[in-house]
């Protein structure tokens, strides 16, 4: 039987525990709000080019989720131009507010002086809405049917701004582009998270380079694939169809991670161990199986309804593509 004094002690212990949890939660929220602005540049070297190709520097940006008034993010995006990449690849989710396009284009203007290629994500087309974050543990997020018209973002204005600057739109498209004096094949898809992807294949296979310069070998052009969300069906298609590398975003690296463990969710069917960073992807039958590099950016922003990051700092990725070992 519990005595009054015992009940009193239990009540005091409960109050202390509740207070500690509340304090811990407040501290965690404060940390998450701080970390979301601790931008960094991750650097990787990827040996994917044919022998004889010169190194190529690629700046991969993704998931900016821009909101008017984000001065620190805007300054940091502009400063990325100091990296002087050969090409900028943008894998979508650029917006998080219907009035963000002018400020986003202003922030990216220094980067848009460089060649660029882009594909969209769902938060290029539609604004985010408030959701229970625990839903992410049940599976990938969704828009729960046809998005309301009031959620549609001015993505056409954004794409027009990119294209006017010379960036190439790889949305369900394929093309050959000359970057830093060398030719590359690109193939991209519209956002797989919305089920919008349609595969355009690749430019004519086996075509020799037209440039007779000794630095540009007569070889099959390198193939770079782009998608916003790295769903397995998309990765399998690109791997089996001959891509040399896939770049994607969408996962936010898990966004709220466990230190020493990593991501708890990827918001798609990609294994959480690959939710951020450079890894590999394999696909095909036993006779045709291929393995290629997969680069997934942890992204630069967050939804405006979940503006925190924990053990997963926002990033741009500077890739140095080099020739494969002989």
Image (cartoon, rainbow, N blue to C red):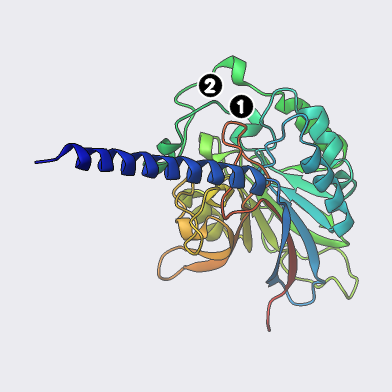
Q: Residue most toward the bottom?
A: 326
Label placed on residue 79: none
State the residue in front, 160 or 85. 85
Q: Which of marks 2 and 1 precedes in the sequence?
A: 1
Q: Is residue 81 above or below residue 52?
A: above
Spot occupied by residue 34 in the image (x, y as percentages of width and height): 66, 46
Could you classify mark 1 by the number of other residues whose Cα lies within 10 Å: few (under 14), some (14-19), or many (20 or more)? Answer: many
Q: Are marks 1 and 2 in contact (CB under 8 Å)?
A: yes
In this rendering, the count of numbered labels is 2
Q: In the image, residue 207 lies at what x, y percent?
A: 73, 62
Based on the displayed image, in which of its 4 quarters is residue 168 positioned? top right
Element class at badge 1: loop
Say which residue appears at 77% left-offset and 59% top-offset: 58
In this view, the residue in front, 163 or 310, is: 310
Q: Quadrant of the C terminus?
A: bottom right
Question: What is the x, y in percent for residue 281?
Answer: 51, 63
Q: Who is closer to the viewer here, 108 or 112?
A: 108
Element carrying mark 2: loop
Quarter of the figure with the N terminus = top left
Residue 87 position in % (x across, y down): 81, 55
Residue 126: give its label: 1
Q: Residue at x 85, y 47 (%)?
A: 111
| Residue drawn where x is 41% and y is 36% of the image | 135
Can residue 162 be seen here? The reply is yes
Residue to which mark 2 is pinned = 147
- In space, the residues marked 1 and 2 are separated at their CA atoms by 7 Å
Along the viewing direction, whichever of 20 and 259 lies nearer the viewer? 20
Q: Is residue 134 left or right of residue 301?
A: left
Crowding at label 2, few (<14), some or many (≥20) Cα neighbours within 10 Å? few
């Amino acid at each position: 039987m519990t005595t009054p004094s015992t009940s009193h002690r239990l009540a005091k212990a409960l109050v202390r525990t509740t207070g500690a949890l509340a304090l811990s939660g407040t501290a965690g929220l404060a940390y998450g709000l701080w970390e979301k602005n601790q931008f960094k540049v991750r650097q990787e070297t990827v040996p994917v080019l044919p022998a004889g190709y010169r190194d190529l520097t690629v700046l991969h940006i993704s998931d900016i989720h821009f909101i008017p008034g984000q001065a620190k993010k805007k300054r940091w995006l502009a400063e990325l131009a100091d990296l002087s990449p050969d090409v900028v690849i943008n894998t979508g989710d650029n917006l998080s507010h219907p009035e963000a396009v002018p400020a986003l284009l202003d922030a990216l203007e220094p980067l848009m002086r460089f060649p660029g290629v882009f594909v969209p994500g769902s938060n290029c087309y539609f604004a985010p809405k408030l959701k229970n974050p625990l839903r992410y543990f049940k599976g990938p997020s969704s828009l729960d049917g046809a998005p309301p018209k009031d959620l549609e973002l001015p993505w056409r204005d954004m794409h027009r701004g990119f294209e006017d600057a010379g960036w190439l739109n790889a949305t369900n498209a394929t093309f050959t582009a000359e970057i830093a004096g060398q030719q590359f094949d690109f193939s991209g898809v519209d956002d797989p998270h919305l089920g919008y992807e349609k595969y355009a294949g690749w430019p004519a296979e086996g075509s020799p380079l037209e440039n007779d310069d000794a630095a540009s070998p007569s070889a099959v052009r390198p193939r770079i694939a782009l998608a916003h969300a790295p769903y397995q069906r998309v990765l399998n298609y690109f791997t089996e169809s001959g891509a040399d590398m896939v770049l994607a975003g969408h996962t936010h690296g898990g966004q709220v991670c466990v230190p020493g463990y990593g991501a708890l969710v990827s918001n798609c069917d990609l294994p959480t161990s690959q939710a951020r960073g450079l890894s590999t992807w394999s696909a095909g039958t036993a006779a045709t199986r291929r393995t290629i590099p997969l680069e997934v950016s942890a992204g630069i922003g967050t939804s405006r309804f979940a503006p925190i990051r924990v053990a997963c700092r926002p990033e741009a990725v500077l890739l140095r593509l080099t020739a494969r070992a002989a």
